[in-house]
Amino acid sequence: MSFPGYGAPPAGYPAAFPGGFPGSQQDPLYGYFSAVAGQDGHVSAEELQACLTQANFSGGYKPFNLETCRLMIGMLDRDMSGSMGFNEFKELWTVINAWKQHFMAMDRDRSGTVDPQEMNQALSSMGYRLSPQAMNCIIKRYSCQGKITFDDYVACCVRLRSLTELFRQRDQAQQGVATFQYDDFIGCTMSI
């Protein structure tokens, strides 16, 4: 069974569950979420890592970076629980599939990585207008020998999205200027 708009669950996960699931029985992703989340009904960073690795998001079935998984949970963790409920998981599944499609479109040579020029094009196509200095910092931070893997691409996208949302919340007049108190800045940036 494939999940329309979501991709297929990784091997080893049940395609369908008998019976209903309260509140979400209409959504085929809920059965997959339940298998990933386990008894507590929430997905931790470790469970997300196992899920994304088994779904082969990073390619070659190599483990997705645990820190990237923490970043993704932090991006959507509105209740600050440190884990994801079903709605957060569903939103992440949609976002990560979109990022995967975008990454694959930018990876023109099908190497499984993007180079600095492709990364610049990817970020520009997402609406980010970054200076060459900022782009250089991103490349240095997220590339290994000038190549950026999907895992690192996701980490970069999460940070850019989270920092942009954080800045927009503080930039009330939408003038490109925000004021932060030091503790507020540290608290906000450490949660990303």
Image: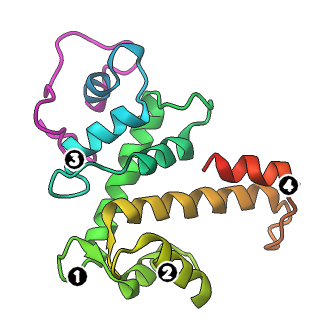
Residue drawn where x is 53% and y is 84% of the image: 136
Residue carrying label 3: 7
Element under disc 1: loop
Residue drawn where x is 41% and y is 15% of the image: 40
Element under disc 3: loop
Depth check, mark 1 against mark 3: the one in front is: 1
Q: Where residue 128 sits in the image (x, y, percent)?
A: 56, 76
Alpha-carbon span between mark 1 and mark 3: 21 Å
* Kind of residue at badge 4: Tyr
* Kind of residue at badge 3: Gly
Residue drawn where x is 15% and y is 40% of the image: 2
Residue carrying label 4: 182
Alpha-carbon span between mark 4 and mark 1: 42 Å
Within the image, what quadrant is residue 100 found in?
A: bottom left
Residue carrying label 2: 124
Depth check, mark 4 against mark 3: the one in front is: 4
Give left or right: position of 189 versus 87.
Answer: right
Above or below, 71 against 118 in this view is above
Residue carrying label 1: 108
Q: Where residue 176 sits in the image (x, y, percent)?
A: 79, 73
Part of the protein shown in magenta: 1-30
Above or below, 65 against 37 in this view is below
Q: Where residue 88 sits in the image (x, y, percent)?
A: 47, 36
